[in-house]
Amino acid sequence: MSATTQDQGAQPEAVRSLIPARLDRLPWTRFHWMVVVGLGVSWILDGLEVQLVADVGSIITEPESGLGIPAAQVGLLPSVYLVGQVVGALVFGRMTDRLGRRRLFILTLTIYLVGSGLAGLSWDLWSFMAFRFIAGMGIGGEYTAINSAIDELIPAHYRGRVDIAVNGTYWGGALIGSLGALVLLNPDLVPIFWGWRLCFFLGPVLGLVIIYVRRHIPESPRWQLTHGYADEAERTITGIEETVEHQGGKLPPVDESKAIEVVGEKSIPIARVARIMFREYPRRAVLGATMMITQSFLYNAIFFSYALVLKFHFDVPSESVPLYFIPFAFGNLLGPLLLGHLFDVWGRRKMILLTYGISAVVLALAAVLFSAGALTAVTQTVLWCVCFFFASAGASSAYLTVSEIFPLELRGQAIAFFFCIAQLSGAVAAGVYASLVGDGSERGPLTAGYFLGAGLMLIGGLVAWFIGINAERQSLEDITDPVTSTKRRGAVRAEGAHPSAR
């Protein structure tokens, strides 16, 4: 690493560095598994939290629970958690770009641990909602800090499959929540007053283990370099290389042609962040928004009307609904795990079109059969499992896309912005589809809703195909120059000017 001469003291020093190339050429070792396990647990915790609230919703209406919340007000709980996520993403997304990935992924996990644990000690509706809001803030902040750190620490060769697999583990958390609830919410095993409270300690127990692991995960040297901490970045990357080499990973030579030159900036003004995202990269903004909105609409439309459809259209007893949820969750979990590597091998655009497109076709087929009355609860669930095997990988690729196509210095804020758009889209879908279910006497409105969801997913896939980025196996700095790159000084690069852009 070398530095250019300072411009008469008027400008910060420009630094030439091979840090991105040094990170991307590393072989896979236990260090990378530590990063994946230590940071990837965020999605598991979110899936756990959402599922637990769904499971305890009816329990906390009972006087024996110690809360006795009116049934009409239970619906407020998911909304409060959602608002907390949106606030947390926006607040901590800005902070992770300004203060660093490591500080924030420790802070946001701590906030979640406190919020979720306190929810188990709630004494009335208002205390419960306040604690759920805090837990939501922690998880919302987690998404921004975690996805940023993973992308910047994982070698380019593996980035797609790792991101997609990690994002898909949301459904592993949902499974943990379901299985835990089967025991803790069984009044024959645990008294009602304590059962639902113990459920909210499942996440904090897991989180306490993970926070220990996170203490050993370094700051992103990419973040340090672009924020004026070049010496710290050099020490961090040297430490990572020594760890990888000690673990048996032979280090290949560094490609000297991959050097970048940056002038570190401690913070990028919010107005400049908006200008870069929407004026320099409008096509990428459209790509990110389209992918996030379409996948979130589909997921929330199906997931939050799942139990109602089984109950009113297939006469499945309420107590049997979780049995149908388990294969659905497994399908969602297996999709990203089995298909993720293809996003690195076959490419982003091909796989996004494939996963979005197949899920759209299967959902449309399910809509036709549902309308004709040709399905049972079992066959309907089988079709949903097939649909979301592909949709889950596609949804995970949406998060991957928005986290890798914008400059490093505003990555956290980009993730936060598109995450919030997705959450709001999902909230609308959940309300609309719950009303389309009806009392089971008519299937026309819900059939039309299924066709709408299928159409939106197809649109998302086509948009990715036509304006998507061939980001597979490319360094983040090859996908888009850092804001602090000297290439940007004196001129704003036009959208699509980068060799890898379309």
Image (cartoon, helix red, strand yellow):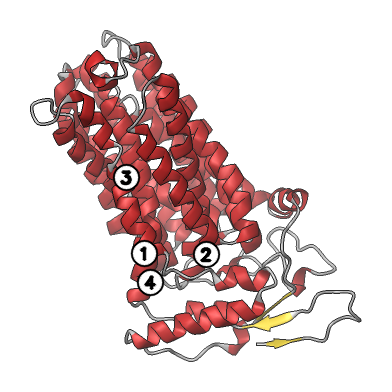
Which residue has dot 4 on it? Answer: 32
Q: Position of residue 242 (x, y in %)?
A: 43, 86
Where residue 270 appears, x then y in whole percent? 73, 49
Q: Secondary structure at mark 1?
A: helix
Q: CA distance from mark 3 to mark 1?
A: 15 Å
Q: Which residue is mark 2?
A: 471
In this rendering, position of residue 448 left or right of residue 381: right
Q: The N terminus appears in which quarter of the rendering?
A: bottom right
Q: Residue at x 46, y 80 (%)?
A: 240
Q: Amino acid at mark 2?
A: Ala
Helix, strand or loop for disc 4: helix
- Can residue 430 be seen here? The reply is no
| Numbered-mark total | 4
| Mark 2 or mark 4, whichever is nearer to me | 4
Q: Which one is in front, 444 or 440?
A: 440
The quadrant where residue 382 appears: top left
Decide which of tag 1 and tag 4 comes sooner along the chain. 4
Q: Earlier in the sequence, mark 2 or mark 1?
A: 1
The secondary structure type at the circle numbered 2 is loop
Mark 3 nearby-residue class (10 Å; few <14, some 14–19, many ≥20) = many
Q: Nearer the N terminus, badge 3 or badge 1? A: 3
